């Protein structure tokens, strides 16, 4: 089971990483905070102080088309905001 799926690189997440030393990741929906902490420490070689998680519910949509009503939804995801120890940095752009 892969715990870390991908880092979140948005304007808000980048500002949070520069000012508060917090990095955001999309993680497996069944992962808990302890598993996320161990995965980040193993993958990036940093020490994690705090982990906050967010469960994002699926967004449901209804479209009215010629053939009738179509219902759909997006996938549910889990986000983790990881705060690192003072002086620690993750370089997310190194392997691009």
Image (cartoon, rainbow, N blue to C red):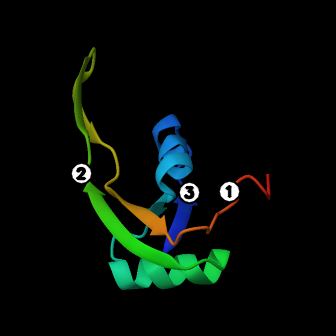
Residue placed under numbered mark 3 in the picture: 7
Residue 59, above or below 36? above
Residue 60, above or below 30? above
Residue 12, above or below 83? above
Question: x, y percentage for residue 59?
Answer: 25, 41
Left or right: residue 84 versus residue 63 is right
Separation (CA) of disc 1 from disc 2: 26 Å
Separation (CA) of disc 1 from disc 3: 8 Å
**Residue 14, image quadrant:** top right
Q: Residue at x 51, y 41 (%)?
A: 15
Q: Secondary structure at mark 3?
A: strand
Residue placed under numbered mark 2 in the picture: 57
User: Mark 1 touching mark 3, by CB under 8 A?
Assistant: yes
Q: Secondary structure at mark 1?
A: loop
Q: Earlier in the sequence, mark 3 or mark 2?
A: 3
- Most foreground residue, 91 or 36: 91
Q: Residue at x 56, y 59 (%)?
A: 6
Of the numbered discs in the image, which one, if any, rests on residue 92?
1
Q: Secondary structure at mark 2?
A: loop
- Most foreground residue, 75 or 52: 52
- Tag nearer the camera, 3 or 2: 3
Q: Earlier in the sequence, mark 1 or mark 2?
A: 2
């Amino acid at each position: 089971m892969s715990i870390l799926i991908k880092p979140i690189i948005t304007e808000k997440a980048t500002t949070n990483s520069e000012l508060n030393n917090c990095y955001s990741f999309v993680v497996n929906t069944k992962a808990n905070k302890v598993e996320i902490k161990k995965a980040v420490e193993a993958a990036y070689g940093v020490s994690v102080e705090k982990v906050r998680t967010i469960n994002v519910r699926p967004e449901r949509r209804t479209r009215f088309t010629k053939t009738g009503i179509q219902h759909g939804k997006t996938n549910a995801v889990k986000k983790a905001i990881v705060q690192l120890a003072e002086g620690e940095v993750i370089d997310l752009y190194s392997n691009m």
